[in-house]
Image (spheres, helix red, strand yellow):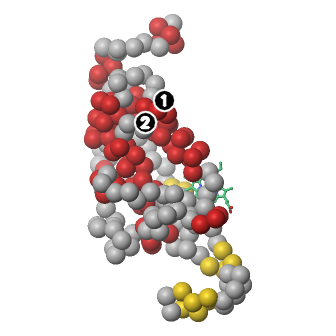
Amino acid sequence: MKKVQEEIRTLGGKKEFLEEDDVQKFPYFKAVIKETLRLHLPAPLLVPRETSESCTIDGYEIPAKTIVYVNAWAIHRDPKAWKDPHEFIPERFLDSTIDFGGQDFEFIPFGAGRRICPGIPMTIASLDLILANLLNSFDWELPAGMKKEDIDTEMLPGFTQHKKNPLSVLAKPPMRDKTPTFKSPRLQA
Ligand code: HEM
């Protein structure tokens, strides 16, 4: 958290509101989003498919008209593809060209092929903008007495992943805001 906030607050030019172009200057922030989509992909089994003809995959014969699920959750944690696959290590994406565009089959949070999610640009633009501004504008703390090891990542069963128990966090204005470089008209009013 500290590392990504430092990047945003240093490279973001101390702006009060970051725009889409600003976020493109934050490689570590981008890596954090990728690593989150690797470990906690919203659709862990993608969207089911039906085979149009029989085929053989990895020695298994799949008859025509079979419903097939791609276990992207398992692919994203495959030790043959990822070092320390269960660990949250955004740095693994820094010197890597692996992206979610459907060309790198070890990382497919939006699927791949001709039915790949068409919402990628909208998703990434919204995630970038909302998350970068939340990290820029606030410091985040766990409620008193709670340690980071206590964060519960349990999910409800379902087609898309939803947290079983809500996450409680405290948003605090960062210390640097004691002497703001820019005051919005809203704050001055
Ligand atoms: C984090 C956000 C999102 C994730 C992880 C996600 C993931 C996916 C996945 C895994 C698929 C199936 C692709 C496949 O099986 O190969 C899919 C399909 C689809 N997604 Fe998304 N999606 C997201 C956001 C969106 C948004 C914002 C939109 C619309 C604005 C959208 C629209 C669609 C549509 C229409 C399909 C069906 C495409 C088809 O079957 O041709 N998605 N998405």
Find disc 1 in the rendering and name its residue: 19
Q: Ligand 1 falls in which quarter?
A: bottom right
Q: Is residue 78 visible?
A: yes
Q: Residue at x 47, y 68 (%)?
A: 105
Q: Are marks 2 and 1 in contact (CB under 8 Å)?
A: yes
Q: Quadrant of the N terminus?
A: top left
Q: Residues within 10 Å of mark 1 (few under 14, many from 20)?
A: some
Q: Secondary structure at mark 1?
A: loop
Give the answer, above or below, for where 121 lies relative to 14.
below
Q: Position of residue 179 (x, y in %)?
A: 30, 14
Question: Residue 79, how many percent across, how many down?
Answer: 33, 73
In the rendering, at what x and y percent does residue 140 appear?
Answer: 36, 37
Left or right of residue 60: residue 7: left
In the image, taking residue 97 as reference, residue 71 lies left or right, namely right
Exactly how many numbered labels are in the figure? 2
Please say if 49 is above or below 174: below
Amino acid type of the residue that numbered disc 1 sits on in the rendered structure:
Glu
Q: Which mark is residue 52?
A: none
**Residue situated in front as seen by the camera: 157 or 82:** 82
SS class, disc 2: helix
Q: Residue at x 65, y 64 (%)?
A: 115
Amino acid under disc 2: Val
Which residue has dot 2 on it?
23
Left or right: 174 in relation to 34: left
Residue 36 seen in this snapshot: no
Residue at mark 2: C-beta within 8 A of ligand 1: no
Compared to residue 50, the image places residue 118 above or below, namely above
Q: List x then y, in percent, for residue 102.
A: 52, 62
Calculate the distance from the C-alpha at mark 2 to the C-alpha at mark 1: 7 Å
Compared with residue 181, is residue 149 higher up or lower down, i.e. above or below?
Answer: below
Q: Residues within 10 Å of mark 2 (few under 14, many from 20)?
A: many
